[in-house]
Structure formats: C-alpha cells, structure tokens
Image (spheres, rainbow, N blue to C red):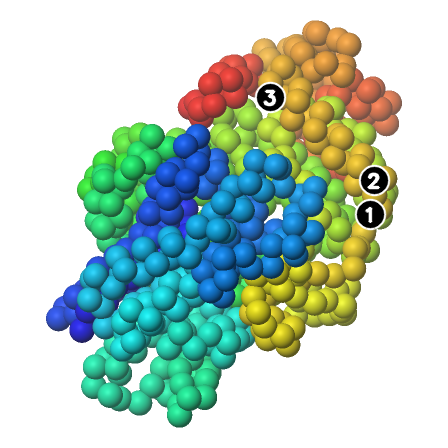
Amino acid sequence: MRITLVSMPWASIETPSLALGILTSRLRETLPDVGVETHFGNLDCAEWINATAADATLRDYEFFSRNSYFKGCGDWVFSSALHGRAAWNVEVFDEQMSGEISPQEYDLCMRLHAAAPAFIDDQARKVAATAPDLVCLTSTVQQNVASLALARRLKDLLPDVRCVMGGANCDGEQGAGLHRSFPQIDYIVRGEGERALPDLVRGLADGGDLSGIPGLCWRKEGVSVANPMTDRLLAPAEIPVPDFDAYFARVARTGVASWFEPRLVLESARGCWWGEKHHCTFCGLNGSAMTFRSKSPEAFTRELAGLAGRHKVLDILVVDNILDMSYVDTAVRDIAASGNDYRIHYEIKSNMKYHQLERLRDAGIVALQPGIESLSATVLRLMDKGVTGAQNVRLLRDAECLGLSVFWNYLYGFPGETAEDYLPVIEQMPRLHHLQPAGGSSPIILERFSPFFDRPELGFAERRPHRQYAMIYDLPEAELLDIAYLFDTPKQGIGEDVEEALFTALGAWEEQHHVSTLTHEDDGDTIVLTNTRPDFDWDRIELRTPAEAAAFRVLDQPRSRPALRTALERKGVTADVDALLDEWGRLGLIFSDEDRHIHVATTVENQRLCRIASRTGEVMV
C-alpha cells in the first residue's frame, strides 16, 4: 500500500507538521512494507500567493494562518473550490468582513478565492502523481476547507483512492459531523492517530472489521458510522520521534525562502495538568485528551538534541499546553548543561517564581506564553485560572528582568464580570509601561470542549454556530452545530465604554513601552529607583529609611496589607503601611489588586538587556 500524508493551507510554513512527522515515523515503524510520502500543500500555497501578488510577504500568508481565524477568511478562500463555484457567498463575505479587514486584505482574499479552484486542481494532480492508495489529510484551525476541496478533486482524478482525515478539527462530534456531510472523506480519525491510523491501514489491507478501531468514522452500506472514542490514551513512550526529513527537503526547494527561517516543532507532553484539576472556563484545547502525560526528561532532551543536530536548527517551538513542572529540575537543567544555543518557546503557568524562570532562561527557553489573560483577580477567578493579577504582574516584571519574551493577550467578556473588575487595573496600567504589553485584547468566543460550552449554566446557554460557518459551508444549521468549533453568543460582561477604555489603555502601553523604564539598585542600605515612564514626572528616588527599604524588599512578592505589616514587624521596623502604599501607588512603584501589592521595578543590568532586546527585536540573555 502507498500512503501520502498531506498538510494543506493554512498550516504554518515556518515549522514542519508535527502530526505528519509523528505519523511518518509511526507508519514506518509499525508497517515497514508500506510506502509513505508527504506533500506540503501549505508551502505550495505560499508560493502560489507569491506568484499571485508580486509584493506578497510572510505577513500575507499569516493573515490567513494566524490572524483571521475568528473571521474564517482562510477557509472561505477555498470554499470556491470545495463547492465548485468561482464565487461562493461573496455577498455574505462582503457583509461579514465590512470594517473587519483592510482593503489590501480584502483584495487578496478575493484574488485567491477566484484562483482557488485552479490551485486545488494543481494540488490534486501533484498528490495523484504519487500514486496513493490512501491519502491522509491533517486538519487543524483553518485547514478544513482546503483539505475537503483537495479530497473532492482527488476523487475525480482517482476514483478508487481512499481519503482519511484527522487532527484537532476532527475531534469528537466535529469529526462525526464532517464525515456525515462530506462523502469524499472515507474515514475520519477522531483523537490521537498513532494507534488508529496503523490499525486502519491493516484493516484496509486485509479487509478486516473496522468497527473495533476506537474513534474511527467509516461507512457501512453507505451510512456513516462513528465508533466510540477511546478510553486509553497514548503513553508518552508510545509517541515516536517525528520524522521531519521531507519538510526540510521541501523547504530547501521553496520559492519563498526569503520569507522565513524554519523552526523545529516538538512536544514534551500532551494534555494539561492544570486543566485536569481546574479546566479554564473559556479554553477548548485538548478536546477528548485532557489527561496530562509527559515524556521522560531523558527522552525529550535526546529528541531535542537529535533533531536540532540533524536539521541544524536551534529555534524550537514546543507545543505543549503547559510545562511539566518537574522538568525545571530535570530536562531544563540538562538542556542548560548541554551548552547548545537554543531559542525555545514554551507555554507555562504564570505563577512561576523568579528562580524557576531563571532556569528556563539558562536553558535557552527565552520565549514564554504564560496564559496571563487578565490582571484582575476577580476575572481570573471567573476563568478558573488559579492565579491572581499580582502574580501575573510579577511574571511580567521577572521576565523583563531576565530578558524573556512574553506573549499574552487581554481577554474580557466573562459572565459575571463588572466595570469594577477593569477600571482599577486600567488606571494602573501606566505603572506597567516598562513591562511587556499585551499583544492585543478581545472578547472571548465560546469554544467547543470548554467548560463554558459543556456547562450552559455558566452563562452561555444561548449559542449558535459562529457566523463564518454559514458563509463557508453549504449545510443546514443542525450539521453546522456539530462541525463548528466556535459559537456566537449574546455579549457578556463589560459594556462598550469600559471596553474602549481598555483598548485605549493597552494601546498607550504598547506605544510607550519602548521609551519606558523603571529600575532599582539595592546596595543593602539605600534603594535607588530610576524612571523614564512618561506618565510619571520623576527621574530618581532614593529609599533611605529602614522601613521603606524593608517594605520594598518584602513587596518583591505579592503581599496583603496585614501580611506586609507582619513582615515588617518581624524585621524590627514599623511603618504607616497605608500611607506608604498610597505614596508608592502615586509614584507608580507598585501594582495593587484585591489588597495584594507588589513592586514593579526591575533590576538595572537586566533592564538594560531587555531594552536592547526590545529595540533589536531579539531576545538577549
């Protein structure tokens, strides 16, 4: 049997497909007599965009792959090919995108939409040239429609070819709904594919019964059948080292080489240990596989070093939802000891301490996604985040000290939130302008698999498929309800006036960040603070009294007023804590939330490194 694995737009072109890399290894390991090839339609798509728009850049591709997911532009582009119409729902697209995208983005959407059938035909002919018996399509985020369109055209060229689809877009009811609605997809693998796909290949080869393959969708006498989902997730030791050779061979021939430097993509764990205990209410990640499982530290460090050495790439994107905290004293330690100049991106929990962040930095884990999402303890409780606003500010401060890049967004629109949960934070944002600002702000959208979705009583009982799905697919709403991952709901939470105040404050933070510093030097007797934040009219302050110096040092960690008084008493000093906090608030030295206070000044040397990083666009360590 010959199998062709396919990654269609709009998968990232900067990294190989982790799913296809793992499945390539798995198939060759378990079925050595099966021929396996890989086709990167996403890289072909980047070249197609480059040919369609002479001045195109990576940013144009990323508009579809990253920036328009909540609008559906990427899937709509290929709807003309899926439905066999040169212009599919153009009027609806115009209506939905009015004021949502720029004229340049709109023009690119229209040009690609018109040309999509020709592109899909070309892709189908390239895949058909590999003479496949089985074509396996991975679908995550906005890969659905390009994958469905390719399968449809392949069936015209190779009527006997069988198409299977898997990935995050195929989990649970989504996979069952896609299988019912699109007959060009013969099989859908729901959930982890490392066992299911080899079992499917064996079943097809020997004509065996497919009803025992957990999660598989197949057809019996023309009727879609969805096997029960598995209750046995993969153990980490069962996940093979991905094979990325095909991706890097294709990158070496790409016509858009000037657009990007390739990065490796790895996983050290699956699931979320926090989500197992407290699933963040808005989060739909993990779907049917929340159980946290991590590779042994030794296995992961070997995998990292092996792939980095094989492909001569040191930029690493680790896709875990959350760092295994035991790695700090194991894998992270060993990576630091390796002496390799890695630049690694990891998702972490935002309550990590300074010494833990320092260990990450020393290992080359210099880009963090800590899931900050808010600086209000009240709103963070509504999210079930398990952290406070002061802890999130501590993370921003400590990351700035250590020269770590932090990627985060400010979310709002939670049932039960009020203006009082936002206005005190907004008022204090000028105090934080020297720390890394949010990348943006947006209301939450109801996501399948999230507690908000599974428990309507939490506030989102009224929902319907997000409007993009009716624009993209030709299906009744009853089917869209199963296919959709995003859902439209009535607006919740803060009003437009507070929303606008939040946007304005975050915009000022981003604008002033590059000229803002707040540093401190502590010689043991006197603490000297230096400020360049435009909203504060002082340059230098000295904390000379024992009470001031002691209070500042204690506020390195979040403290309540009673805890601060107790800590000072233990140090043998007394102070008017209320007056001190009021004065330091006026000077912008502290951040306060729900009677938790923390100083926000960074250290001098590390602040200098952060300024260099900010101005050069690099991470300096």
Q: Is the C-beta separation of discs 2 and 1 under 8 Å?
A: yes
Residue for badge 2:
498
Please indicate, yes or no, whether residue 601 appears anywhere in the rendered image: no
Count how many numbered circles sit on residues in the image: 3
Query: How far across and how far down the image is residue 479, in percent?
Result: 59, 75
Q: Nearer the viewer, residue 525 or 443?
A: 443
Dot 1 alpha-carbon crowd within 10 angstroms: few under 14, some 14 to 19, many 20 or more: many
Seen in the picture, residue 575 relative to 185 is either above or below; the reply is: above
**Gap between marks 3 and 1 measured at Cα:** 32 Å
Give the mark nearer the N terminus: 3 vs 1.
1
Dot 3: element: strand
Going 67% across and 20% down the picture, which residue do you hit? 512
**Gap between marks 2 and 3 measured at Cα:** 30 Å
Dot 2: element: helix
Residue for badge 3:
602
The residue furthest bottom is 221
**Side (left or right) of 244 relative to 402:** left
Q: Nearer the viewer, residue 555 or 495?
A: 495
Going 27% across and 72% down the picture, which residue do you hit? 158
**Side (left or right) of 138 relative to 63:** left
Give the mark nearer the N terminus: 2 vs 3.
2
**Side (left or right) of 577 relative to 169:** right
